[in-house]
């Protein structure tokens, strides 16, 4: 049970209410918040889409979504109570009359006056929709008694010019405080724990710098391919736009940013922008590139990317990327940051590994053991791992003396796992982010200058990927193309 209930009555309008995201994430998240008494006593959820539903058939869609996707137990009386807050508004996004009809419902008091518009729609429709909301009088003035907030799903543009254009359109009609650009990675419990781990403890923050850190690895590996009819979207988007420019850059910012002067949104986001403005692809050297791109082939009973539905058979879109980045500031200068992400990889995992430098003098003999069989090995550096998913937790690899008559040390791991500490299911990312949007807390959302700083970093990498021609092929179930190893000074990824 959440401790604080949202006080303000609110109307939650979902544009694209018949879409996949609404069914899989938004409705189950709102249902869980309702079940935990986090939503205000007076609220309404309005589904806005072209489908010929009415409130009764829309409620049937909601019930089906909850039965299939909710992490909260489906309780018939609770579902009935939840559905009593639902209604449906049939309309086309290009039809001014549809917006006028929605505004009439607010004017007559049919809906609570505060409004949160969730744009679960195609990126090229966002600007037009916000303009239509404004023309219909559905957007209230910033900081007024009746508030308006607009949640925008990624991608936030395709490159720096389009991101600037989208920001310009949004800011023509909304104040920055009214815009909530959502990146669901920032709603994950373990992602938020990066900040608390770093800045609520004095133990590790003093060594998070170039003096003690050898390198940082950030991995976001997926085993899936183009399930869910994603082929056409992904073929136009690719791995850099889909994962690196948002999710991986956000993780990088949280683990490398300077301590903020407070936890309010502006302080945290200011520090992230500083990192992004100092971030760049590392310098390349002979036989040591800073970027590698791959595309999965066929094998292990799966289709090659080019054979996936709605994908160009000659596609050069990368489904894998490995990058060596660097941050040109005092704290991190000279520390390589390795990013790796892709589809159809060996296992599903998202984690950040901070590997520290080895001691300057090797005083001890190190061994690696399996049971009672041990071999002398090289020094194993200390490594701090933030496991984002699955098996969420924080793990520290250190050296400890192995029980024996000899002075030898062995690598051991100190574990903190969420499942071992708290006997409860972790909140879904959308639950936390929707609750924050209702609260008016934009800390975990992306600011306009942050978006533009991300694209300023990724645009040259996109250009380099296009110029490099064919991505390297890799086998499904592998860790990407072997050529990716060339971006590393040392074989740091061969520890899976």
Image (cartoon, rainbow, N blue to C red):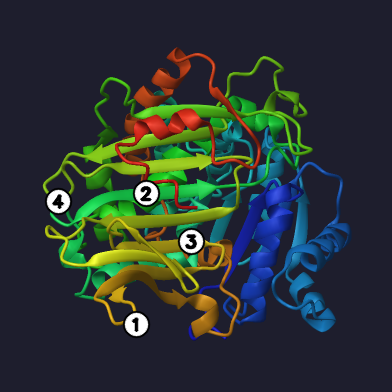
Element on which disc 4 rests? loop
Q: Return the residue at label 2.
A: 217
The residue beneath circle 3 is 388
| Left or right: residue 464 compared with residue 438 | left
Give the spatial CA distance, label 1 vs label 2.
Answer: 32 Å
Q: Earlier in the sequence, mark 3 or mark 2?
A: 2
Q: Nearer the viewer, residue 396 or 363?
A: 363
The residue lying at 38 percent from left, 26 percent from top is 461
Q: What residue is at 86 percent from the left and 51 percent from the top? A: 53
The circle on residue 331 is 4
In the image, is residue 49 above or below residue 128?
below
- Per the image, the residue denoted by label 1 is 403
Looking at the image, residue 430 sits to the left or right of residue 375; the answer is right
Q: Along the polypeptide, which appears first: circle 2 or circle 4?
A: 2
Q: Earlier in the sequence, mark 1 or mark 4?
A: 4
Q: CA distance from mark 3 to mark 2?
A: 13 Å
Q: Judge the density around disc 2: few (<14), some (14-19), many (≥20) Cα neighbours within 10 Å.
A: some
| Picture quadrant where residue 121 is located | top right
The reply to whether residue 440 is visible in this rendering is no
Q: Indicate the quadrant containing the N terminus: top left, top right, bottom left or bottom right.
A: bottom right
Q: Taking 190 as reference, is 443 left or right?
A: left
Q: Secondary structure at mark 2?
A: strand
Tell me whether circle 4 and circle 3 mark residues in contact (CB < 8 Å).
Answer: no
Q: Nearer the viewer, mark 1 or mark 2?
A: 1
């Amino acid at each position: 049970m959440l401790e604080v209930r949202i006080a303000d009555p609110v109307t939650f309008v979902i544009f694209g209410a018949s879409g996949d995201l609404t069914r899989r994430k938004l409705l189950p998240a709102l249902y869980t918040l309702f079940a935990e008494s986090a939503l205000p006593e007076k609220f309404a959820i309005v589904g806005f889409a072209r489908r010929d539903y009415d409130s009764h058939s829309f409620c049937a869609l909601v019930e089906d979504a909850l039965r299939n996707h909710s992490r909260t137990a489906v309780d018939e009386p609770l579902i009935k109570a939840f559905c009593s807050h639902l209604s449906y508004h049939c309309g086309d996004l290009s039809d001014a009359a549809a917006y006028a009809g929605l505004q009439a419902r607010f004017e007559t008091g049919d809906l609570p006056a505060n409004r949160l518009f969730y744009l679960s729609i195609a990126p090229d429709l966002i600007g037009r929709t916000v303009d239509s909301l404004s023309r219909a009088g559905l957007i209230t003035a910033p900081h007024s008694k009746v508030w308006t907030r607009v949640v925008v799903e990624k991608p936030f543009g395709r490159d720096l010019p389009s991101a600037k254009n989208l920001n310009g359109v949004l800011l023509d009609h909304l104040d920055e405080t009214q815009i909530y650009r959502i990146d669901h990675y920032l709603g994950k419990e373990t992602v938020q724990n990066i900040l608390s781990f770093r800045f609520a403890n004095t133990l590790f923050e003093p060594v998070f710098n170039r003096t003690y850190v050898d390198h940082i690895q950030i991995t976001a590996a997926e085993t899936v391919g183009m399930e869910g009819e994603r082929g056409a979207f992904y073929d136009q988007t690719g791995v850099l736009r889909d994962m690196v420019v948002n999710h991986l850059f956000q993780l990088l910012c949280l683990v490398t940013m300077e301590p903020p002067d407070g936890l309010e949104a502006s302080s945290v986001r200011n520090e992230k922008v500083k990192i992004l403005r100092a971030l760049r692809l590392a310098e390349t050297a002979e036989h040591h590139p800073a970027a590698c791109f791959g595309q999965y082939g066929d094998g292990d009973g799966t289709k090659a990317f080019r054979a996936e539905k709605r994908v160009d058979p000659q596609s050069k879109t990368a489904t894998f990327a490995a990058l060596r980045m660097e941050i040109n500031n005092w704290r991190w200068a000279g520390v390589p940051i390795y990013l790796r992400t892709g589809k159809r990889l060996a296992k599903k995992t998202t984690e950040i590994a901070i590997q520290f430098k080895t001691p300057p003098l090797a005083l001890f003999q190190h061994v690696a053991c399996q049971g009672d069989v041990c071999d002398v090995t090289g020094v194993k550096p200390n490594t701090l791992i933030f496991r984002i998913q699955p098996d969420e937790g924080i793990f520290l690899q250190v050296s400890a003396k192995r029980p024996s008559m000899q002075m030898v040390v062995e690598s051991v791991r100190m574990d903190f796992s969420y499942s071992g500490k708290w006997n409860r299911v972790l909140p879904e990312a959308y639950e936390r982010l929707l609750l924050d949007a209702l609260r008016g807390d934009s800390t975990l959302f992306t600011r306009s200058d942050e978006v533009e700083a991300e694209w300023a970093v990724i645009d040259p990498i996109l250009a380099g990927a296009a110029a490099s021609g064919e991505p390297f092929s890799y086998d499904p179930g592998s860790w990407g193309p072997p050529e990716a190893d060339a971006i590393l000074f040392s074989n740091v990824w061969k520890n899976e």
